[in-house]
Image (cartoon, rainbow, N blue to C red):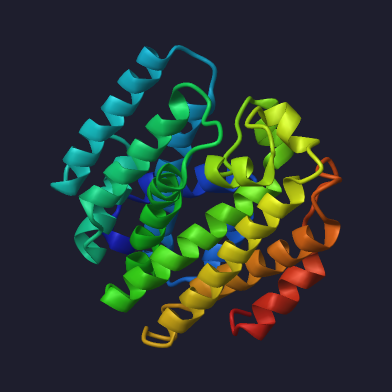
Amino acid sequence: MSVPLGLDAADLAAVSEEVRAAGTSFYHGMRMLPPERRAAMYGIYAFCRHVDDIADEPGELAAKQAALAVWRRRVAGFAHGVGEDAITRVLAAATKRFDLRREDFLAIIDGMEMDAGAPIVAPDLATLDLYCDRVAVAVGRLSVRAFGDASAAADEVALALGRALQLTNILRDLAEDAARGRLYLPGEWLDAAGVPRDPARALVAPSLGAVCDRIADRAAAYFRAADSAMAACDRRAMRPARLMGATYAALLARLRQRGWQRLAVPVTLGKWRKLWLAFRHGVL
């Protein structure tokens, strides 16, 4: 039996197992893809996981920057077809097969470097947008190519959906981020609502909800823009993106229902809700 992307079976197994062991629903969700595209997505996920761990783990900034610099070198290698371990060999093959762009991998590393230093607290809107572009939209630009659509419209899907997903994540993780000294809500909007820029104080401010509602409105607009852009894309290739958008839009709706005064109460989608969304969007 041939191995997808002409990979060594051991390399593909190692990357697949790394994704499976992470305990993410991504592993099962991407099993809908044909083998070559699934292998590419597992490689992209493993890459993101490694550089994200560098940013999040305790340590000095200089050490984190050095570790991220190693990954910049690895990107340069697999962009030219040279891999040194299972992940980079999978990505070398995926890059060649699906024309994945080196600059998107580097943008993700740039985003991790933003998180690696002093905690991000109340960034201005331009910085928040740049952060979303690096940590989410760049992943989307890689993903749509692996899904099977490298058109300009697919990049528009990545731009809108990536921002929608990241803004939803910011709202979902407000309490967790504040515990780490982080606050990704834009400083201009906090100031306008009279919300302190200090993460702990912001979470108990009476007018925090006004800022969260503005973020939720912006995320919803991006979900709509992504849906519009998908109309010009390959319908089959966009199936994973449609499911991801529907799932996160439902999560955003649940966050609105819970409100912004009980941030310690987790918001998730149940298994049956996820299955219903998958059936609705033609994935199962």
Q: Tell me if I can see residue 24 in this picture.
A: no
Q: Which residue does the image show at 55% across and 59% down from the upper left?
A: 165
Q: Tell me if I can see residue 247 in this picture.
A: yes
Closer to us: 141 or 191: 191
Residue 124 point in image, percent of width and height: 47, 41
Q: Is residue 153 left or right of residue 131?
A: left
Q: Which residue does the image show at 67% across and 46% down from the upper left?
A: 193
Residue 176 point in image, percent of width and height: 70, 35
In the displayed structure, would residue 182 be above or below residue 9? above
Name the image quarter holding residue 197: top right
Closer to us: 245 or 215: 215
Q: Quadrant of the N terminus?
A: bottom left
Closer to us: 159 or 82: 159
In the displayed structure, would residue 206 be above or below residue 139? above
Q: Is residue 282 left or right of residue 79?
A: right
Q: Is residue 106 left or right of residue 186?
A: left
In the displayed structure, would residue 216 be above or below residue 16? below
Residue 276 point in image, percent of width and height: 74, 78
Residue 128 point in image, percent of width and height: 46, 45
Q: Is residue 165 left or right of residue 81?
A: right
Name the image quarter holding residue 184: top right
Q: Which residue does the image show at 54% across and 62% down from the upper left?
A: 164
Closer to us: 254 or 242: 254
